[in-house]
Amino acid sequence: MIRVAVNGYGVIGRRVADAVAGQEDMQVVGVVKAKPDYKARLASEKGYKLYASDEKSLDAFRKASYQVSGLAKDLVREADIVVDACPEDIGARNKVMYEQLEKKAVFQGGEEHDVAGVSFVAQCDFDQAAGKKFVRVVSCNTTGLCRILYAVDRAYGIKKARVILARRAADPEESSKGPIDAVVLDPVSLPSHHGEDVMTVLPHINVVSMAYKIPTTHMHLHSLIVSLKDGGATEAGIIEAFDGTTRLLMVEGKEGFKSTAQVMDYARELKRGRSDLFEVTVWKDSIKIVDDELYMFAGVHQEAIVVPENIDAIRALYGGYSASDSIRMTNKSLGIVK
Amino acid sequence: MIRVAVNGYGVIGRRVADAVAGQEDMQVVGVVKAKPDYKARLASEKGYKLYASDEKSLDAFRKASYQVSGLAKDLVREADIVVDACPEDIGARNKVMYEQLEKKAVFQGGEEHDVAGVSFVAQCDFDQAAGKKFVRVVSCNTTGLCRILYAVDRAYGIKKARVILARRAADPEESSKGPIDAVVLDPVSLPSHHGEDVMTVLPHINVVSMAYKIPTTHMHLHSLIVSLKDGGATEAGIIEAFDGTTRLLMVEGKEGFKSTAQVMDYARELKRGRSDLFEVTVWKDSIKIVDDELYMFAGVHQEAIVVPENIDAIRALYGGYSASDSIRMTNKSLGIVK
């Protein structure tokens, strides 16, 4: 059994903890929380051993009458591998602790590539991470893009990919975030960092990106325009490539998938925890080739898509698993059928 | 004085009527409304002579104690030129009446190109419409795109333009429209019609477009990726081209224009009626050239941008004006400084 500590119990940490608990070869040794809020209550109710992020946090938990098993470093000592799901940049600070305690760690996409040296999407570069000390699971957008672009590149070769990201501005729980009735260019200056981030996983693919935030809470929407090397590319060929791609769900407008709303409604029917959609969503009938350029729409459930990658990243660091074995085990446990 | 009838008093008709009233060489002979709602009240209060769209409409107005001067056809008889601002496809039906009464007419972008045979953006093809019987002012998105692409094409030549339109889903008054928390692919199947529509004005420019609706009420947001013929294109050169382009407003992120919200807030300060922004908005610091491709963001105030085009289209049909004279007169009357 791989003993996993989950440091941070927010949007990602909560999901990773449950996913780890669902693996036959892993166990959750505990989770770290900073504040005694409702998420701490959830962790306790689910039976996870709770650890405080620091002394001040420990004090707050005690005042709120929580049973706490110790500090983050106490938990890390008990683990084989840490999944660091702390807010952006905190992971980089935590790395010192993981190094001191000689523990392997999985970081999230909010951290810089250099924190780990390996940026990870299971089906693209599992072997790059195998046996390493640190790995960085890339952001939700990058994960979705990598799954798609890797498949297109293998089928026809990519000359250049251009991506416009319409980003959900806030997660459903983030009631203080805006905008309400505006498009926020993020950033105004182009290109955005997303293209560059894809290249931390797929360095041979040239990607230029633009991004803005819109008033939605569910799914990022990607518009892709991909120049292909192979002049013989067809829409059927692209669809065939996606059919053979794991963690990629194809939907069609004519089935009623006219927007992100229907995709999330579909996800709710899958009876997964939190209505999570781990697959990147591709609108099959949006796929169009014009003058050797592929045009298409894709969607990313921002809270969920990196969960399977975190599980595979744990196995990659631990060693002894092949990419295909790990992906198969993870998919089965999470209800991902393809 | 050019005697103008405004058939339809909705989002566009209301604005065009006021703009016509503000021209030294035009007068509003009356406006046509279908229903005695608050917009009819506004028309009366502003002193426009009110005409009913048909007998049934006339009856409704009488029951609501409105003073009505007659039916649409009575108004059309009194006019030199009709601006048809009726809902999509109604314009095409009205054309029969205009032909019977031998009146010239300006249609809107909701109609097909063939209704008029000439699709119009003043600074691109005023002379094409000069002296014609009918002209079609293109949609708000097409108008904005034409102003931008025409300028870029003149500066560096366009090999291919790709545009992603994040469309405001509803105008501020449309309280029954959605979505609230979703991106609606419109259409799912690519490309969208917008690229083709630009080519009704600029047939030599190859434009491919994708579009979706987002939960906002103000401005469409365009992401442009334009392959240039001239390998020597620079960002400064693009900015220079835009500096010399009328009805194009440049804003900068560093001035605080981080989103569409600040642009509309700026427009409210201009003390124009309805806080209208007739100019297409370009984020100057978004302009970026990567490998002979121009990347940039632009915004379109969907309710307002076609107003100056309607005024110029009237003059083009009437005859005897040059493009530059008409544009100068229109700009001055509407407070467009460049």
Image (tube, coloured by chain):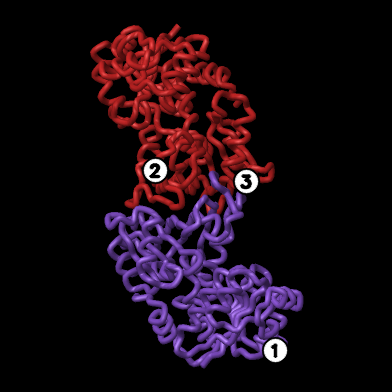
Chain colours: A red, B purple
Q: Quadrant of residue B270?
A: bottom left
Residue B229 visible from this viewpoint: yes
Name the residue tied to disc 3: A258
Residue kind at label 1, given as amino acid type: Leu
CA gap between label 3 and label 2 equals 30 Å
Tell me what residue is drawn at x 39 percent, y 83 percent. Answer: B328
- The correct choice, above or below, for A214 with respect to B325 in the image is above
Helix, strand or loop for disc 3: loop
Name the residue tied to disc 1: B101
Tell me what residue is drawn at x 36 percent, y 46 percent. Answer: A192
Residue that sits furthest to the front in the current view:
B65
Chain letter belonging to callout 3? A
Tell me what residue is drawn at x 61 percent, y 31 percent. Answer: A268
Name the residue tied to disc 2: A206
Chain letter belonging to callout 2? A
Q: Are marks 3 and 1 in contact (CB under 8 Å)?
A: no
Instruction: Using residue B89 as the reference point, say whether residue B167 is left or right of it.
Output: left
Of the pair A238 and A233, the residue shown nearer to us: A238
Residue A250 horizontal/vertical position (percent): 61, 37
Point out which mark residue B252 bears: none
Marks 3 and 2, the one that precedes in the sequence = 2
